[in-house]
């Protein structure tokens, strides 16, 4: 089997690393990949958003299955593009079609889905330019802070949490006026939920599903969860509070009703569903759905899958996931994200990275790197995720930090307090 993984981050490196361990996989291609993915396969110079380019790579390299890492190609319809093309339609795409990917691509669609299927989520209302004048009235029914979300994909910047009601009104108007481009044609305003977050994942063939390990992501740039939001500064798995009682509620109140809801709505979902949850006094609520795996969550949950991950991929591809097994590693896995100084604001690229040879007993997943001659250089804000196993979270973190300290690039930064709240 030849596999093509689309994307270039730590998630895609972790996927390639895991699939390279499968006896059933012959060749792995990553498009475009990074300086780390070359250790698990062959990088292809392509843009996952350019579907004709993807098609050419698939045919040239006799690809049997395509795994889509990031959300944008899914929301733009890469799965539908394959189904509509006579030379591609027999090649399974792991990732939902355009209509199913609306769970991530439109917050308004996701909230409506959650409400219609009685899945716990924050109270909300959606607005567009024609209902702008009703915003103050709805805000007045909520307690601060106010959560304001651009409807569409906004590169992780589309959620604002604002204390002042007048500022909230101004922000809604600014988003509807194009602050986030077309992503802000609609705005969701919702009740703020207070609790601790967790990321829960399933893989589904549209009929049955398998629960993957859960994780907790650390989104803020600063220690103690302060400062700007980032793509994620570290992650741990398992998550202490996600015990059996909590996960039973997640299954009964969230995952099963989501599967039933998709089926009732006539949506066949093939791929990963990422449930962004918040634990409010022991009860799970959905904050968001994503149509993909998380990053940096993948860098801790994929290493905790002990069995052959390709079995699950094949199960989705052939629609027999119920016949496939999954075995989870009981150990903890943690990851610490090393980022460029200045991130998530402006930062430098092209900085040489050294010290890989000094690391041991860890997995260094590349997130924003590329190869330049004999060097690995930075090519993004989030550069490397240093993942380790341990019999406790502390032990795993100790290893991640010991190894992160060996890797150097000018102005690098990482949070020293991953796992602090667990
Ligand atoms: P998102 O971009 O949808 O992942 O949202 C970014 C972050 O905003 C989430 O990870 C939460 O920390 C926060 N958030 C979103 N919705 C809510 C809510 N209803 N209550 C509290 N926090 C929220
Ligand atoms: N780590 C959060 C995300 O992947 O969206």
Image (tube, helix red, strand yellow):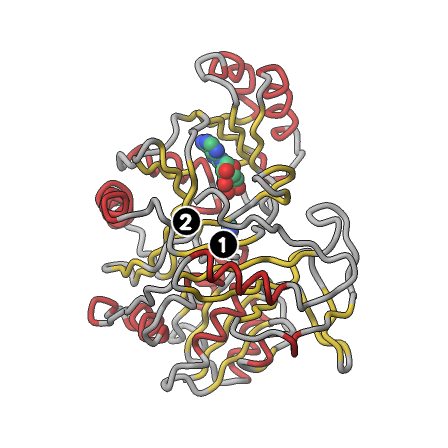
> Which picture quadrant has residue 42?
bottom right
Q: CA distance from mark 2 to mark 1?
A: 10 Å
Residue 413's x, y, as percent?
A: 69, 54
Q: Is residue 121 above or below residue 142?
A: below
Q: Which mark is residue 235?
A: 1
Q: Is mark 1 within 8 Å of ligand 2?
A: yes
Horizontal relation, residue 126 to residue 256: left or right: right
Task: Using the image as rendered, state which of residue 279 and residue 395 is in the foreground.
Answer: 395
Q: Is residue 283 above or below residue 265?
A: above
Q: Is mark 2 within 8 Å of ligand 2?
A: yes
What residue sits 43% from the left and 68% below the top?
303
Contact, mark 2 vs mark 1 (Cβ under 8 Å): yes
Q: Is residue 169 above or below residue 298?
A: above
Question: What kind of element bears circle 1?
Answer: strand
Residue 248's x, y, as percent?
A: 22, 46
Is the C terminus in the top left, top right, bottom left or bottom right quadrant?
Answer: top left
Task: Using the image as rendered, state which of residue 383 and residue 413 is in the foreground.
Answer: 413
Q: Which residue lies under the disc numbered 2?
A: 199
Horizontal relation, residue 402 to residue 141: left or right: right
Residue 192's x, y, as percent?
A: 46, 27
Q: Is residue 215 above or below residue 143?
A: below
> Which picture quadrant has residue 178?
top right
Is the N terminus in the top left, top right, bottom left or bottom right quadrant?
Answer: bottom left
What residue sits 38% from the left and 58% below the top?
272
Task: Using the image as rendered, state which of residue 272 and residue 376 is in the foreground.
Answer: 376
Say whether residue 97 is visible.
no
What residue sits 47% from the left and 62% below the top?
396
Question: What kind of element bears circle 2?
Answer: strand
Few, some or many residues within 10 Å of mark 1 (<14, 14–19, 20+): many
| Lower position in the chain sequence, tag 2 or tag 1 | 2
């Amino acid at each position: 089997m030849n596999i093509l993984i689309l994307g270039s981050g730590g998630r895609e490196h972790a996927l390639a690393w895991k699939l390279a361990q499968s006896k059933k996989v012959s060749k792995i291609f990553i498009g475009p990949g990074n300086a780390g993915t070359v250790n698990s396969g062959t990088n292809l110079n392509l843009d996952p958003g350019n579907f004709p380019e993807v098609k050419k790579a698939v045919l040239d390299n006799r690809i049997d299955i395509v795994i889509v890492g990031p959300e944008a190609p899914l929301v733009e319809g890469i799965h539908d593009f394959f189904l509509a093309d006579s030379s591609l339609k027999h090649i399974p795409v792991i990732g939902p079609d355009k209509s199913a990917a609306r769970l991530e691509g439109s917050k308004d669609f996701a909230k409506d889905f959650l409400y219609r299927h009685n899945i716990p989520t924050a109270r909300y209302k959606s607005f567009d330019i024609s209902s702008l004048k009703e915003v103050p009235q709805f805000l007045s029914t909520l307690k601060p802070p106010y959560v304001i979300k651009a409807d569409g994909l906004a590169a992780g910047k589309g959620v604002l949490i604002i204390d002042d009601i007048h500022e909230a009104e101004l922000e809604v108007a600014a988003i509807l006026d194009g602050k986030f481009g077309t992503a802000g044609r609609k705005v969701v305003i919702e009740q703020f939920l207070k609790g601790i977050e967790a990321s829960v994942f399933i893989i589904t063939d549209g009929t049955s599903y398998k629960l993957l390990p859960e994780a907790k992501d650390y989104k803020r740039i600063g220690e103690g969860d302060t400062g700007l939001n980032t793509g994620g500064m570290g992650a741990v798995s398992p998550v202490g509070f996600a015990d059996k009682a909590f996960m039973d509620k997640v299954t009964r109140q969230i995952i099963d009703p989501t599967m039933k809801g998709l089926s009732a709505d006539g949506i066949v979902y093939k791929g990963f569903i990422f449930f962004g949850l918040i634990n409010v006094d022991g009860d799970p609520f959905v904050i968001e759905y994503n149509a993909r795996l998380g990053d940096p969550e993948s860098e801790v949950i994929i290493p905790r899958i002990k069995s052959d991950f390709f079995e699950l991929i094949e199960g989705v591809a052939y629609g027999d996931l119920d016949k496939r097994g999954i075995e989870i590693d009981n150990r903890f896995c943690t990851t610490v994200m090393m980022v460029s100084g200045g991130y998530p604001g402006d930062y430098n690229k092209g900085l040489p990275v050294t010290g890989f040879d000094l690391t041991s007993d860890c997995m260094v997943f590349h997130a924003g790197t590329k190869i330049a001659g004999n060097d690995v250089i930075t090519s993004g804000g989030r550069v490397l995720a240093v993942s380790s196993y341990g019999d406790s979270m502390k032990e795993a973190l100790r290893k991640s930090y010991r190894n992160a300290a060996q890797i150097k690039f000018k102005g690098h930064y990482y949070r020293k307090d991953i796992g602090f709240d667990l």
